Amino acid sequence: MLAMKHFYRDLGAQAWSIYGFRDAFNLQENWYSGITMGLNQAPMAVMIENYRTGLVWRSFMTNPEIQQMLTAVGFTASKP
């Protein structure tokens, strides 16, 4: 999240457009793509939500097939 905040706040319009982050950029070369690809935006939204609330991970882990698979391959819960 810190990196995303830096890209948004510090780089501004160079790395971010009204549709989200630019398709690519290279800070070392001071190069920024002129396009924004929507395909890249959906996974970022899911990752941000998972970081914020853990909703995606909790939903995934409640799936009975996932629990069966974890047991079958020998995974055990870690102690906090």
Image (spheres, rainbow, N blue to C red):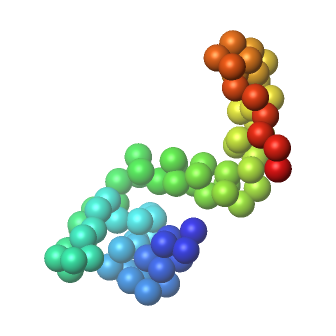
Image x and y of residue 1, in percent: 57, 68
Residue 36 x, y percent position in the rendering:
34, 60
Disc count in the image? 0
Q: Position of residue 71 (x, y in %)?
A: 74, 17
Q: Quadrant of residue 68?
A: top right
Q: Residue at x 17, y 76 (%)?
A: 29
Residue drawn at the location 43% of the way across and 76% of the way down: 7
Residue furthest left in the image: 29
Q: Nearer the viewer, residue 39 or 6?
A: 6
Q: Nearer the viewer, residue 60 or 40?
A: 60
When asked about the image quadrant of residue 17, the answer is bottom left
Task: Give left or right: position of 32 versus 10.
Answer: left
- Is any atom of residue 31 visible in this view? yes
Q: Residue at x 71, y 60 (%)?
A: 52
Of 37 and 63, nearer the camera is 63
Residue 32 located left or right of residue 61: left
What residue is at 38 percent from the left and 83 percent from the top?
11
Residue 72, how many percent across, how many down? 69, 13
